[in-house]
Image (cartoon, rainbow, N blue to C red):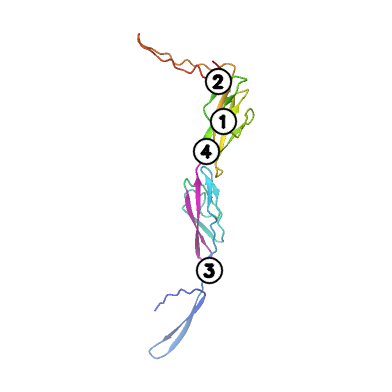
Amino acid sequence: ANPTAQPSSTTTYTVLVTDGNTCSALDSVIVTVNPLPALNAGADTAFCMGGSVQLGALGSGQFSWSPASGLNATDVPDPIASPSATTTYTVTLTDGNQCASTDDVTVAVLGLPNADAGADAYLCPGFEIQLQGNGGGTPAWSPVADLNDPNALEPLASPVVPTTYTLTITDGNGCTASDAVFIDVNTDPPADAGADQSICQGQQVTLGGSPTAIPGTT
């Protein structure tokens, strides 16, 4: 008979064999119970979309991560994770006795806030224009020169040279998004009468282009 043994600690088992002549013999076998390797996959974590985060499992032995998607390596304790969506990774640690432990860690992917710096515009020298920023979060404009409040969504800008202003929005998770607007400063305002057109006698046509509504001009 071949019984199954599953001791909770190292145990010596003795077998007694007796034949038909009542002769007997003893033998023993030691079943050593090796503990599972200590493993900690680390705390659940998160990163902003487009970025990455470094995992950090603790333990001694051979590491194996799954799924492999979004990881720069699967056989190290601290791979860099950049999944496209929230993912739970399982790490398996195998020690020298071929005993294995597993643990999980969830990596959340945080969305980015909206950021809109508004439309490009023209400005005559000596005038000011109100920037039309929009976004859900804390705003910050750069460069801050010539702005009356770089931390407002719609600050007044009075540049003396053509300037590109960048609006950065930071949400409650610390994720950021940016957008830029170009303010052209020139003594010669842009003029656009639109494309040439053709009509039949008696018809009307709307002239195109954008020759009006430019800040500081008539």
Nearer to the camera, 116 or 66: 116
- Secondary structure at badge 2 equals loop
Q: Write down the region rendered in magenta.
A: 86-111
Q: Residues within 10 Å of mark 2 (few under 14, many from 20)?
A: some
Identity, as a three-letter code, of the amino acid under mark 2: Pro
Q: Is residue 214 left or right of residue 197?
A: right
Earlier sequence position, callout 2 versus callout 3:
3
Instruction: Give the vertical position of 8 relative to 89 (above or below).
Output: below
Task: State whether residue 87 is above or below residue 35.
Answer: above
Distance from the alpha carbon under mark 2 to that under mark 1 = 16 Å
Label 4: which residue? 136
Tag 1 secondary structure: loop
Q: CA distance from mark 2 to mark 3?
A: 77 Å
Instruction: Please state which of residues 160 and 28 is positioned toward the viewer in this rendering.
Output: 160
Q: Is residue 76 magenta?
A: no
Residue identifier under label 1: 154
Cα–Cα gap, marks 1 and 3: 64 Å
Q: Does label 1 or label 3 sit earlier along the sequence?
A: 3
Identify the element where label 3 is drawn. loop
Q: How many marks?
A: 4
Answer whether labels 2 and 1 touch (C-beta < 8 Å): no
Q: CA distance from mark 4 to mark 1?
A: 13 Å
Residue 34: image x %, image y %?
52, 70
According to the picture, the residue beneath numbered tag 2 turns out to be 215
Q: Earlier in the sequence, mark 2 or mark 1?
A: 1
Mark 3 Cα-neighbour bin, 10 Å: few <14, some 14–19, many ≥20: few
